[in-house]
Amino acid sequence: MSQADIGIIGGSGLYEMTGLEDRKEIRINTPFGDPSDSYILGTLEGRRVAFLARHGQAHTIMPTELNFRANIYGFKSLGVSAIFSASAVGSLKLEHQPLDFVLPDQFIDRTRQRVSTFFGNGVVAHIGFADPLCSQLADIVEKASTGIGFPIKKGGTYVCMEGPAFSTRAESHLYRSWGAELIGMTNLQEAKLSREAEICYLTIAMVTDYDCWHEEEDPVTVEMLIGYLNQNSSNAKNLIRAAIRGLPQNYSCSCHQALATSIVTSPENIPPETKKALQPIIGKYIS
């Protein structure tokens, strides 16, 4: 039986979710190692929710060190069908100002040191990823933002960089020339793995600063970021609660059928240990 149907990933500045009733903390062991922290289970707006602090509740894990596979596998094993991912980002467009919230709909991957698939070890699958974020969740969050009088911007491309250092000015200007709007260090891998796990996934991007292309602004500092993160945190919590109130029991998007035609390897050729490890992911299609 599912222990939660909605997942929330809290990014920098969002280390807990207030308002959870019947709270329970649970640690999950996965075939890919340990998730970032314990999952906090509870009831929020009448729905069962699992919350995970992406970088750990004490913010001890760098973006490159994140065990993305374990984090998403943990949500899948809990029965989660939709994930809201709150993430601090830099802005590559003048119109996206600090404290703005944006719902991107595309990614550019500039990471180099990360694993972003559950597959391998004797099984091959190629998911469709042309539209990497769930449009149904985006519509729900946009409507929720209107309902609480908190304007939000919809659409745009998120550059996922390696980090932990911020961009050089040359890199920042390059990304702007590509038409990108936001830059962050975490969400691309989460989105890919959520798609493989047939979980709806949405980035709620919280702008903390203009990236260093904006030379009239002072260079970003950790102190500056923390100030904006604290303000963004309460806004994110209110927005997510409002969005949860608008979630359906069933989803009409294609996210939950992402693997239906994506697994290439014949079942008889998949090693038994791989079948066992990936049972929550592929068990719907391969016994």
Image: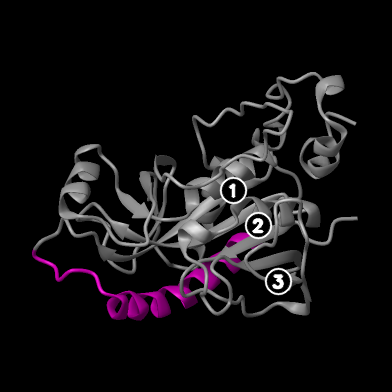
Tell me if label 3 and label 1 are in contact, CB under 8 Å: no
Residue 283 visible in image? no
What is the secondary structure assignment of the residue under circle 1? strand
Q: Nearer the viewer, residue 210 or 6?
A: 210
Label 3 to label 2: alpha-carbon separation? 10 Å
SS assignment at label 3: loop
Residue 192 badge: none
Quadrant of res 246: bottom right
Provide the residue span drawn in magenta: 216-244
Front-lying residue, 194 or 60: 60
Does residue 241 show up magenta in the picture? yes
Q: Residues within 10 Å of mark 1 (few under 14, many from 20)?
A: many
Image quadrant in which you'd find residue 229: bottom left
Q: Give the residue at x 83% y 61%.
A: 3
Residue designated by label 3: 38
Residue 287 image position (x, y, % from top left):
90, 31
Which label is found at residue 201? 1
Amino acid residing under circle 3: Ser
Instruction: Name the side, left or right, on which 58 lies relative to 72.
Output: left
Tell whether 217 sits left or right of 66. Answer: left
Residue toward you, 145 or 18: 18
Which is in the foreground here, disc 1 or disc 2?
A: 2
Q: Which residue is mark 2?
A: 71
| As drawn, 26 above or below 67 | below
Q: Position of residue 200 (x, y in %)?
A: 63, 45
Give the vertical position of 33 relative to 131 (above or below): below
Secondary structure mostly seen in magenta is helix
Q: Is residue 90 above or below residue 180?
A: below
Label 3 CA crowd tier, 10 Å (few <14, some 14–19, many 20+): many
**Amino acid found under the numbered disc labelled 1:** Tyr
Give x and y (percent) for residue 100. 34, 64
